Image (spheres, helix red, strand yellow):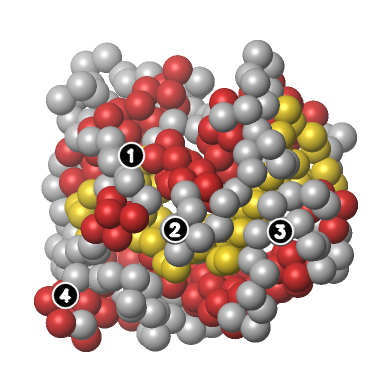
């Protein structure tokens, strides 16, 4: 049993990120001193929202400069910390070089942080933000497993540098993390495997793919319909709670699927149709043959192999371990999606609908 002292600081890497912002907020509310690692602490456009979070909170925020690919750059930020929460990893579909833009930062960044943990005597626990993308590559992969339900025992075996490179990067990074963790016995690795993250941001101007999807849902780009793709959904606030639980619960261990809902892209948008009926919310799925034909022309990341192995498949994963061992409870999906959509409207990220 590992007992973590809340009076000791906690390092959060990638602190300016969508998920990390909520983790920082939760820790500050718990009275924890947060060592927030960012690329440039002097860039107020990137860190002002973090410093504002610390106002009137019992915890304290200290910014540190660090970079995923700068070996040893996390050493100062990690000093004195018993818990390290490593969230920093690129999540983008707009890439030119998968190795350079995704795999190298994810893998070598993980190596950099965990090797620094090996050299930092105070560290007792590392919480790694992985992904359900490290559990499966395509929704068709469910046909390879008994019952068709993804669990923590499953690993993505189908993604490569050329097919689903983001998923490949998350898989390689998590495998490396376990390799490093298993060679030592001073600190424990606890891995968080979230599904598709939605919900309001600490700031609503994120370039996260989650925000990009909701913007396109609201601005009419997707009004013709959506591909029939099954996904899991997790509220970003619940995900932050899972990280804090993974950091402090004595028996937190292993991989943990964090997902509140088994649904689909259309299932996500259906939660908006009643409250936001005046917006061009997509209400139907497009036929698979049409996606196969025009998808690669509209978006180079939508390859025909992706269409073949993902469109028309439902998605189902078990969150039982997170409920049983981390004590998780999950918000309803309509609360998550509606709050995110309204935030984007309030901040001008989605245009007002034209009057009919």
Element type at mark 1 = helix
Element type at mark 4 = helix
Quadrant assignment for the C terminus:
top left
Front: mark 1 or 4: 4
Q: Answer with left or right where residue 9 lies relative to residue 77.
A: left
Residue located 69% across and 36% down the image: 7
As measured in the structure, the alpha-carbon distance from the residue carrying label 1 to the one carrying label 3 is 43 Å
| Residue 161 shows up from this direction | yes
Residue 51 spot, x, y in % from top left: 73, 25
Residue located 39% across and 79% down the image: 156
Residue located 64% across and 75% down the image: 185
Residue 107 spot, x, y in % from top left: 65, 74
Nearest the camera: 277 or 187?
A: 187
- Tell which circle, 3 or 4, labels the residue nearer the N-terminal end: 3
Identify residue for label 4: 148
As measured in the structure, the alpha-carbon distance from the residue carrying label 3 to the one carrying label 4 is 38 Å
As measured in the structure, the alpha-carbon distance from the residue carrying label 3 to the one carrying label 2 is 16 Å
Q: Which mark is residue 217?
A: 1
- Tell which circle, 2 or 4, labels the residue nearer the N-terminal end: 4
Q: Which mark is residue 123?
A: 3
Circle 1 residues within 10 Å: few <14, some 14–19, many ≥20: many
Q: Which mark is residue 251?
A: 2
Circle 4 residues within 10 Å: few <14, some 14–19, many ≥20: some
Q: Answer with left or right where residue 11 lies relative to residue 231.
A: right
């Amino acid at each position: 049993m590992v007992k973590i002292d809340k009076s000791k600081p906690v390092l959060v890497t990638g602190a300016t990120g969508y998920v990390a912002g909520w983790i920082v907020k939760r820790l500050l509310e718990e009275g924890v001193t947060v060592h927030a690692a960012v690329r440039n602490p002097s860039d107020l456009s990137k860190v002002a929202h973090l410093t504002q979070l610390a106002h009137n909170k019992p915890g304290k925020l200290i910014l540190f400069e660090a970079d995923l690919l700068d070996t040893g750059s996390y050493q100062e930020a990690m000093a004195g910390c018993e818990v390290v929460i490593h969230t920093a990893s690129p999540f983008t579909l707009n890439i030119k070089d998968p190795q350079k833009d995704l795999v190298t930062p994810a893998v070598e960044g993980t190596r950099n942080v965990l090797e620094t943990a090996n050299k930092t005597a105070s560290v007792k626990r590392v919480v790694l933000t992985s992904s359900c993308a490290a559990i499966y590559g395509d929704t068709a992969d469910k046909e390879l497993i008994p019952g068709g339900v993804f669990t923590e025992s499953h690993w993505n075996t189908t993604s490569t540098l050329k097919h689903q490179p983001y998923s490949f990067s998350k898989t390689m990074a998590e495998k490396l993390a376990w390799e490093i963790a298993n060679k030592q016995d001073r600190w424990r690795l606890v891995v968080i495997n979230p599904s598709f993250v939605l919900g309001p941001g600490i700031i609503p101007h994120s370039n996260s793919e989650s925000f990009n999807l909701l913007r396109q849902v609201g601005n009419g780009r997707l009004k013709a319909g959506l591909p029939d793709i099954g996904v899991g959904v997790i509220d970003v606030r619940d995900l932050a709670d899972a990280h804090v639980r993974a950091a402090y619960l004595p028996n937190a261990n292993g991989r943990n699927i964090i997902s509140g809902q088994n649904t689909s892209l259309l299932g996500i948008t259906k939660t908006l149709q009643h409250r936001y009926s005046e917006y061009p919310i997509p209400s139907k799925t497009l036929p698979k043959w049409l996606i196969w034909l025009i998808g690669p022309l509209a978006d180079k990341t939508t390859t025909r192999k992706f269409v073949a192995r993902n469109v028309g498949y439902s998605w189902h994963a078990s969150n039982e371990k997170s409920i049983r061992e981390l004590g998780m409870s999950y918000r309803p999906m309509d609360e998550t999606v509606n709050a995110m959509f309204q935030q984007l409207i309030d901040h001008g990220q989605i245009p007002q609908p034209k009057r009919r």
